[in-house]
Structure formats: C-alpha cells, structure tokens
Amino acid sequence: MTLEIEVTQVVRVRWQGREHRLEPGCPIPLPERQAVQLLSKAPQMVKPTPPVWLFSWRLIAGEVSGVPRDDARFQPLQEALGICDEGFLSNDWGTFCRGWKQLQQVRGNAPRVPYG
C-alpha cells in the first residue's frame, strides 16, 4: 500500500542508501513504511494528503468504538477526538497527532500514533 505525503519545505531524506530531495507542492506517493517513518520524524515539515487522513481516522474509530457512555473514559475520549477533529478541520497534522496521543493515554491500548 502507498500513502501520499507532501512537504511544507524542502526535505532531504535517505532511503535504501540513496538521498532524495522532496519539494513543496509536489505530493509524492511512498510505500506505507517510508511514509510513516517520514511523518513520524518530521511532522512539522511533512503532512499527509487526504488518503492518510482517512487511514488515521479509521484507526482511531476502531479504538474508540464500543466505549459506553457510562464508562469513565467516555468524556476524556470525546475531548481527545475533539482535538483530532480540530486538527483535521484546520489541516493541522500536529494538532491531530496531539489529540491522538491524548486518546492513547486515556484508552491505554490505542494504536501508536504512527505519524507524529
């Protein structure tokens, strides 16, 4: 599977022993593993394009579904989801990841934030 990313400034990366220069305004499809690595190492310089947003929301949804309203974690999970939503709506990957990390702390066993 490939994921598409875009950089906000010129970024030089090394994969498989070769250096690559990524430039703003040129979305690039990368193998999922490389995209996840780059997003996690440089979340302020690299942003996902819509397919990655969808992928991330699906991971989150799978972890919060089934938590009943009377569960003590329900309200803190809603707050964390609100932060994720704020980041998504403003196209701010850093804010989205902050919400995801908060969700992890509340949930305890949520998937690791793969991109930030």
Image: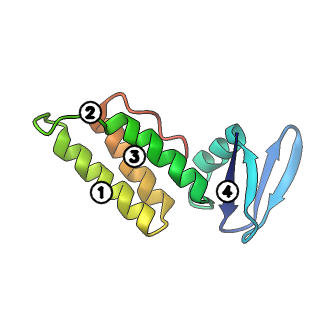
Circle 2 packing at 10 Å, graded few (<14), some (14-19), many (20+), is few
Pick whichever of labels 2 and 1 is earlier in the sequence: 2
Q: In the image shown, does 15 or 76 lie closer to the viewer? A: 76
> Which circle marks residue 5 in the picture?
4
Q: Secondary structure at mark 1?
A: helix
Name the kind of residue labelled 2 in the image: Gly
Question: Circle 1: is it few (<14), some (14-19), or many (20+) Cα within 10 Å?
Answer: some
Q: Quadrant of residue 71?
A: top left
Q: Which residue is mark 2?
A: 66
Q: CA distance from mark 4 to mark 2?
A: 31 Å
Separation of disc 1 and disc 4 at Cα? 24 Å
Reading the chain from its start, which is encountered first: label 4 or label 3? Answer: 4
Q: Residue 98 location in percent, x, y?
A: 40, 52
Please state which amino acid type lies under the numbered disc 1: Gly
**Residue at disc 3, secondary structure:** helix
Residues 7 and 71: in front is 71
On the image, numbered disc 3 is attached to which residue?
100
